Amino acid sequence: MAQQLRPSKPADKQPKIDWSRRQEAEHFAETVKLFRQGKIDPDIFRRFRLQNGAYGTRMTDDYAMVRIKVPAGQVYPYQLEKIAQLSEMYSIGSVHFSTRENIQLHWVILEDVSEILHSLSDIGMTSREACGNTVRNVMCSPLSGVCNDEIFDATPYALAIAKFMLRNPICQGLPRKFKFNFTCCEKHGMIRIVDVGLLPQIQEIDGEKRKGFKIFLGGGLGNRSFVGHQLEDFTPVEDLLYTSMAVIRIFDRLGDRKNLVRNRMRYLVNDMGWEKFQNLVLKERAIVKATQSVIVKLNVDETPNEIRRPISVTEDVTSLPDGFARWQKTNVEKQSQDGFNSVFIGLESGDITANQLRNVADLIRDYSAEGFARNGFSQNIVIRYVHEDDLKSMYSKLLESGLAKTGSLTMASAVGCSGTTSCNLALTNSHRLAKEVQRKFLELKLDEDDDLRDSTIKISGCPNSCGQHEVATIGFYGGGGRHEGKMFPNYTMSLGGRFDEGSMLGHHTARVPVKRVIPIILKIIELYKENKQSDDTLAKWIDRIVNGNESSKINSVEEIKKELTPLLTPPKVEDEPEFYMDYGSDTSYHTVTGKGECAA
Amino acid sequence: MTDSNMPIIDSKILRQKIKENSIRIIDVRREQEYQQGHITNAINLPLAKLLADDSAESIQKIAQNLGISDETSVAIYDDTFGALSSRVVWALQYIGHKDVKLLDVTFSQWKVLGYEISTEIPEIESAIHSVNINSEIMATAEYLEKVKENKNVVIIDNRERLNYLEQHIPGAINIPYRTLSTEGKILRTKEGMKTLLKNRGISEDAEIITYCGSVGTLSGLAYYALKSVGLPNVKLYVHSFKEWKSLEKPTDKQENANYWDLSAE
């Protein structure tokens, strides 16, 4: 058997940067103790806890959510194995992959958080500044370095910015959280919905090709959302740090520290007006450059990662495994490197069991020529540098571990924030709803429909947009509705959101009771099919409608709404009692919320 | 408690004792697993056999049939992270056996270490064992209910977090059984265990009662994890939450959150 001839596995690749600092674990344990003894003011403790990456949990002070930062989304097999173990020891035996490339452990007893922090330092990871008013996890497109449309790989710059900002005194007490996103191309990143979004560019200056970025500032989703503005035509990489520092300094100085609900930088930009803000940034950058007492530089490590295809460990898979074609079509992207592919592992609302996580670690070792994985933007995991010839064998392995869910790169992979599963602010169980939507899509094989491929469904459990509903083709945020004195979970649906070069926020269309969300989505698809043009997609069709460019009979949001209305009428309780219950609950719906910590 | 009184035996010391033939080893896995290979000299006692009737008389009879007299040194192992073997160690201690120890590794870990295994089934002669009930290591539902409000009493639920959140004995805290082990060993290091207890604010002179889902296995492991760091006053609520519920005693739950939907199971 080939198995027996297998050489012992080479040691895991090591990350270039150790993000941890061991003393922080001990300090956290001591501080929790003082807090429990009443020796620390609860507000001060909360700030400290968030600074260290421990978020509050729904309706209780006993538990925390530990958010492990994964800068640029790069995560290594041994790290995943340790996190799997930590989830069984201190959490719920499942782990959550977030939309911002973090890995979250939920329902952790506050007194155990320090044990997790301690173990994270064993694997070079940190949760420091994953929450609170800090620079949050620095994201980078999971396809950076392998994308067919990218100009250069932004990953080393994302890592350098993350390293520079982490524990940096200038980032410890910002008016509000601050987010950087790097991308490979317009399609694969979300550069216009964050504080600082960066798109690689090359410009020829005096016959010399120079690397730089298009920088977008002041975007963000939330109770009020804004699309970011482009700072200037081209920002050379030498100015990346100065520009970032300038923006942070302005935000630190002028950002609103009083009004908790409007203190993200996007409000400052909006209040001041873009041109004024833009001028201020350019001026501030000149000052930052001119007044440095020592030259501060980003430590960009551009040594290429070693690419070596793991020694094949399986016998050739000769027969085509069941479902392979569908999986390949909806989960695999060809890389710019000949013969290599990026394999997307879709998770339901980002959840994965500890054992599956161990399987992912093995899959990386066995199939990825770069030896690590990247967290995606849609609560998923991407294993890159998988050789063409290994896809079938890898698919079989994924099937065995229940990780071969199709549709990762399609509309079927709905995003859902944590909702009432753990969040204090949630009004509905958006997390479960996203799972239900995904299951229905896969059951109906809608992931195979090319017309739907470039559309997205994103669901938030409240208006605060953690589920990014505003940039979805079909987005939902949760709330409560009432019929004949009885409450039911009721989502606000928006249509036509985008996060690419045509970024725009979705158009509020209708209020949809939770148990009608799936029928409404299917109805919209049906309307599209009746009215589509040749070579059309659902996203394009909706885009034309919300922008008033559609000529068929459904030519406005109002027309869509008219078609949907018959489905939206609440039934009598006795006719359909489930209508008045949220997913995951067998009692009638009522809203309960605690104090949010987003604005702490 | 000195180390020799500690109800836990190091795998290296067990090897020595196997050579000396000075210890009775009990394998509590299923018979079929035992037959395929076991620690040299071990005899088989599938846990189910003990659980079928766990009265003192029945445990006594089982011990006698396994050739265990009052003076026999006994070591017990399983392949279920030490939970099943803990339950059997506890049962023998309960009927008053003094020298019984939990092996600090599972059968799988023993194999990884490359230590001796065999398929040979040792011959045993039955022995006489007395019954001298060690009631202070046992908690009944009635007892638990009586003392649970006492300041010095800590009730520990050793089931997984989601089960605990959904339903638990009022006032109980949760230390999932997975928290109790380290790489390659069924129990944490002493230092690690002490840190856990210190963080949780559990004092060394507390009276601790452990429980789990139904038969006292996971909580049995917790019982020995606590004993391993020398806590003097630990009891096992051996019939655990299953009995508690069947007696319709009060329970608590974490309200207003759909935590189950975070699980990918």
Image (cartoon, helix red, strand yellow):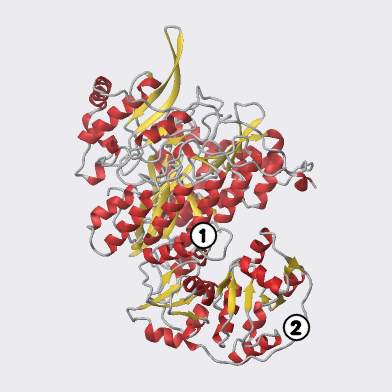
Residue type, numbered disc 2: Ile
Residue A108 in sight in this render: yes
Within-10-Å neighbours for mark 1: few <14, some 14–19, many 20+: many
- Residue pictured at 43% horizontal, 75% vertical: B231
Callout 2: residue from which chain?
B
Q: Give the camera-side residue of A92 and B84.
A: B84
Q: Secondary structure at mark 1?
A: helix
The residues bearing labels 2 and 1 have C-alpha atoms spaced at a distance of 40 Å
Q: Give the camera-side residue of A283 and A364.
A: A364
Callout 1: residue from which chain?
A
Q: Is residue B36 left or right of residue B249?
A: right
Q: Is residue A247 left or right of residue B79?
A: left
Q: How far across and down, in percent of the image, does residue B211 sit? A: 48, 76
Q: Give the camera-side residue of A559 and A150.
A: A150
Q: How many marks?
A: 2
Using the image, determine if residue A27 lies above or below residue B35.
above
Any mark on residue A508, and which? none
Q: How far across and down, in percent of the image, does residue A403 sit? A: 61, 49
Q: How far across and down, in percent of the image, does residue A384 sit? A: 59, 36
The residue that label 1 is drawn on is A88
Residue type, numbered disc 1: Glu
The residue that label 2 is drawn on is B124
Q: Do marks 2 and 1 share a chain?
A: no
